[in-house]
Amino acid sequence: MGRWGTRGTVTPHEQNPSPRPRRESNTGKRRKTKRKKKKTDLEELKKEVVLEDHKLTLEELSAKYSVDLTMGLSPRRAQEILRQDGPNTLTPPPTTSKWFKFCKQLFSGFSILLWVGAILCFVAYGIQFHQKEEPTKDNLYLGIVLAAVVIITGCFSYYQEAKSSKIMESFRNMVPQQALVIRGGEKIQINVENVVVGDLVEVKGGDRIPADLRLISSQGCKVDNSSLTGESEPQTRSPEFTHENPLETHNICFFSTSCVEGTAQGIVIATGDSTVMGRIASLTSGLVVGKTPIAVEIEHFIHLITAVAIFFGVSFFGLSLILGYGWLESVIFLIGIIVANVPEGLLATVTVCLTLTAKRMAQKNCLVKNLEAVETLGSTSTICSDKTGTLTQNRMTVAHIWFDKTIYKADTSEEQTGDSSGMGKTFAKGSATWFILARIAGLCNRADFKAHQETLPIAKMSIHLQDDSNQTHVLMMKGAPERILEFCSSYLLKGVEYPMDDEMRNDFQKAYMELGGLGERVLGFCFLNLPSTFSKGFKFNTDEINFPMDNLCFVGLVSMIDPPRAAVPDAVGKCRSAGIKVIMVTGDHPITAKAIAKGVGIISEGNETAEDMAAQLQVPISQINTREAKACVVHGSDLKDMTAEQLDEILKNHTEIVFARTSPQQKLIIVEGCQRLGAIVAVTGDGVNDSPALKKADIGIAMGITGSDVSKQAANMILLDDNFASIVTGVEEGRLIFDNLKKSIAYTLTSNIPEITPFLLFIIANIPLPLGTITILCIDLGTDMVPAISLAYESAESDIMKRAPRNPRSDNLVNHRLIGMAYGQIGMIQALAGFFTYFVILAENGFKPSDLLGIRLNWEDRFFNDLEDSYGQQWTYEQRKVLEFTCHTAFFVSIVIAQWADLIICKTRHNSVFQQGMKNKILIFGIMEETFLAAFLSYTPGMDTALRMYPLKLSWWFCATPYSILIFVYDEIRKLIIRRHPGGWLERETYY
Amino acid sequence: MTKKEKKSFNQSLAEWKLFIYNPTTGEFLGRTAKSWGLILLFYLVFYGFLAALFSFTMWAMLQTLNDEVPKYRDQIPSPGLTVFPKPLTALEYSFTVSDPRSYQGYIEDLRKFLKPYDLEEQKNLTACPDGALFEQKGPIYGACQFPVALLQACSGVDDPEFGYSRGNPCVLVKMNRIIGLKPQGEPRIECISKSENTAALSTYPPNGLIDLKYFPYYGKKLHVSYLQPLVAVQVSFNATSSTVNEVTVECKIDGSPNLKNQDDRDKFLGRVVFKVTARA
């Protein structure tokens, strides 16, 4: 303490030269070192708040901040400090610039490969341009198309992302708040951001606390700390130092909490980022957030496809050089292979699918801030839920009433529609005791009363005029039950007063214990009809009691709780059956937390904690094997001393866990613990105290109505109706979109094989090119898009809420089975469909398959204008090129036709299409759309010059149908076998 | 999530080694021998079946084809023009009169090409009436004679060097064969020199006439010894004294309304452009 004393009149920021563990007060130092020590800073922030100011006496306080406790700072001094410390605001989280984001979109994923393709195109064009006087512009056009594809998909993704982040902007509108400070003895209203350390501030009921305050005087001041600690009840604040923990002591008020009632004066001990709230906010924005599970999956998938593309590209580039092709030709092959390997439209498809789901979820009151978070809830395996405001209604509600020696249950549901008859006993509203109790409760509820803390620490009392009785005044009192009982010498039973006896005391004790054990806050009520000597106009004085305060009549007990929301127990049950562990993490007391946990099913019926078991078996807790207890309640103070291993042990061994009295930092540690065990963690919360955990979680879910701005900022998802049950919808949608994305990707990847194989055969077998780059782009960006998106509308195959969450390590979006199916099986059939059509067209026009092998060199020779076909006819270069492009068109159409069947089989992964039905109208539209698009591209006049696509004879459309039917039949059989032999070889090898 | 610690090179190498061959599980590239066997067997059967199916559909398709005439001929409605011999680069004939080696290739190509046109070879062919289509009903299709003498100075009979040694080279122009093509009118090859007055062009047969008796063509299989009608173009440079003579020649089919000689994209449809460079 002496250290503080020596500071004298020096301002706090000019001292403390060494970067010692910071105090809340040395703001300047902290700001200066912030950037240098960002990492250690974050570790610092994770530690508990260290604060000494609450232990100081008023004199020490005055000396420390060199402020006069009645006059406040001088305005000049305040200006100086303001200049040194900066404004009293939270630093907004750093934002990345729009250009940076845009560039990221342009150079991520497949874009790099496509850029390489485009650049190779330009290089090839450049070489051709220099070598020949009359170069073909094909490569130039292709390069431009590729670049355009990258830029357009980049713009699209950027637009989608920007749209969802715009939602956030709306939450940022912070209304400037005013604060009442005393400077130089004058009360002045200033903006909150101008409040400085050392300012003398006055707050009253309804105000937001402008900074961290050390109270120096107060009158009945109560603050709502729920956003900081999670406690629903207003806390009394007075100048006394009552607790070592700065969060619990009475003489500190925290920035951005609110004063509920009363008034208080205090000295500002911290402003802006150095406040407790600011620390949490900077901790939140400083956290490095991991990638979302779907982003990890997509990255994995991109790596896979890129690896395949590079492997094919490089090996065939090498092969073509070995086979004696020129550099230029090899480069052109390379471009073709890259274009064929990269599913250009797929990332846009994924974005659209996620957007559709995000929209669907927004309609169900889940607002998703960034698209990728849509799926995260689906993979979630652990939900860490805050209690106050999320599971509960965040309002103290009467839960039980005890009078006439009976406990009655009150309706605690939000809409007061709960059926109370089933539980407890029906209300004896006829009882005279109830009438009196209700009157006391009504009148003692924040009625005109004087604080009486010296003599009646937690009792409230009021004296009222009574008109309808001969005794003019009645004294009514509520308070801690045991204190109330002490005042009483009689009790009320069915409206009749009886003298207090031991039986009544026993009954009282039992009821008190029972209600207290429910985690409820119990109040006792009593009254006394004052004798008529206290006539109208009698001056009651509560400071020096001038009226009788004994022999009161005990009426009953009322217990209150912040009751759970009605939909929560059901939602928790659904999460359970979906294999999701629900953990409660709250700042509230263990008993209350446990009661609510039991009420909502987080601790399910029949499951007991180690303490419960000990109590039941009447043995000390040490003899209970804690592993036997499935449930457990962990106190924040225990958590503080735990090592990471111990925490892991708890998280691993118990299925039903409640963490009580946790600080924001501990919430973060719990989330990190879960993540360390491989879980994908969702955190729900509404308070500032939840925001670090919200940010750290794989998906943070904030409450839209009661949630604080900081929590909304940190969250990925916002529940617009504050209803925990909406999370279940989110989980369901997330799982559905994951399944459907698999289907979409399986569908899209399949057409890669019929795109690559033409190039490979072109190089190896020296046949005319069966499918060109432009037609590949027509498939990837044209016909495949709508059908792939339509799979996002596919309904679930089975009850997705009955299965366990996916294991992010083994259950990937794209696995070798999916690749095997798409590339090895269906893709091969599709390729054959295309090649069959190709051979049919060439044969029917004169080039029999046997004559095609090795024809490439002559075929591609621009000056070889009398190439002989199998019938002796001679073709000019252009004539056979038209034929070749007709083949490209036909190959393209064949892929479309094979993709019909592929789309239908991709509808399901396990069930038969006949079980699933064809109810997906978008999918049917998709099939029609791709067909019409194909017909449009083939038959529109001018397409021959624009895209080099030519009209086809009707019969060529049907060449692919046998293969299309084969795809359907093969996959139905495959799925039938999988259904018949669950866990069999086919399932292990082909169920994606 | 905290940043993953970077794996050391040895560690990742060990992981790769384990992936390639894991001695404890006997896994090779992540699969046991049995697993590999099963998956390979699966794909063997699967691809075997696909190959069989593909072969079957190809066979079925080939059965529908006619051996003599292709199913569709609408892709080549009109013939292209080509020149012979084939120059080495693009369509530029370049040679040096004084250096026989520079045109030796051309002469050999021409001789080889004209071999079937020898009188000896044509003994079995029909002498068809001039100026009318030679339509036949089969089953045996005869081919009309094309006496090489029609090419006169370019026939190689009088001048075995086809004029190359004198700086007046011969180039053969021919029309692509198309089954069933029946030219209307009087088709002939007309050649003009694009560079003015540097060279005179003479075409043989006179006027570049292509007789209708060589049409229609019935295909490689039926029309076995069919001889394609030829037109020879001889370039005679005016200024024989200059060291380098250059001329660009454009030939096109003329006189037949159903044979196109103009197409934006196809530079060889009914026409051909070539360049002759003769050095002294």
Image (cartoon, coloured by chain):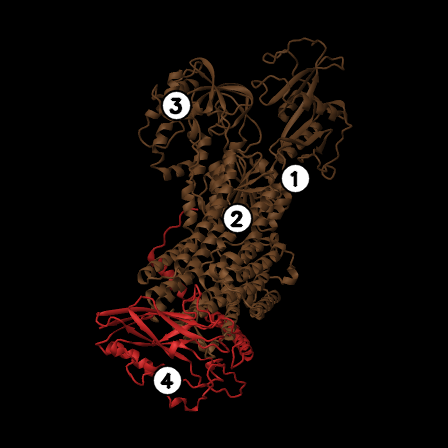
- Label 2: how many Cα within 10 Å (few below 14, some 14–19, many 20+): many
The numbered mark 1 sits on a residue in which chain?
A
The numbered mark 4 sits on a residue in which chain?
B
Q: CA distance from mark 1 to mark 3?
A: 48 Å
Give the labeled residue for mark 3: A82
Question: Nearer the viewer's eye, disc 4 or disc 2?
Answer: 4
Mark 3 and mark 4 residues within 8 Å of each other at the beta carbon = no
The numbered mark 2 sits on a residue in which chain?
A
Give the labeled residue for mark 4: B148
Q: CA distance from mark 3 to mark 4?
A: 110 Å
Give the labeled residue for mark 1: A566
* Image quadrant where residue A287 sits: top left
Q: Position of residue A32 (x, y in %)?
A: 34, 31
Q: CA distance from mark 4 to mark 1?
A: 105 Å
Is residue A11 or residue B179 the one in the foreground? B179
The numbered mark 3 sits on a residue in which chain?
A
Same chain letter for marks 2 and 1: yes
Drawn side of residue A924 relative to residue A268, left or right: right
Question: Nearer the viewer's eye, disc 4 or disc 1?
Answer: 4
| Residue A208 drawn above or below residue A816 | above
Q: CA distance from mark 2 to mark 3?
A: 44 Å
- Label 4: how many Cα within 10 Å (few below 14, some 14–19, many 20+): many
| Residue A781 drawn above or below residue A369 | below
Q: Is residue A172 visible?
A: yes
Chain A display color: brown
**Secondary structure category for the residue under label 4:** helix
**Secondary structure category for the residue under label 3:** helix
Drawn side of residue A296 relative to residue B158, left or right: right
**Secondary structure category for the residue under label 1:** loop
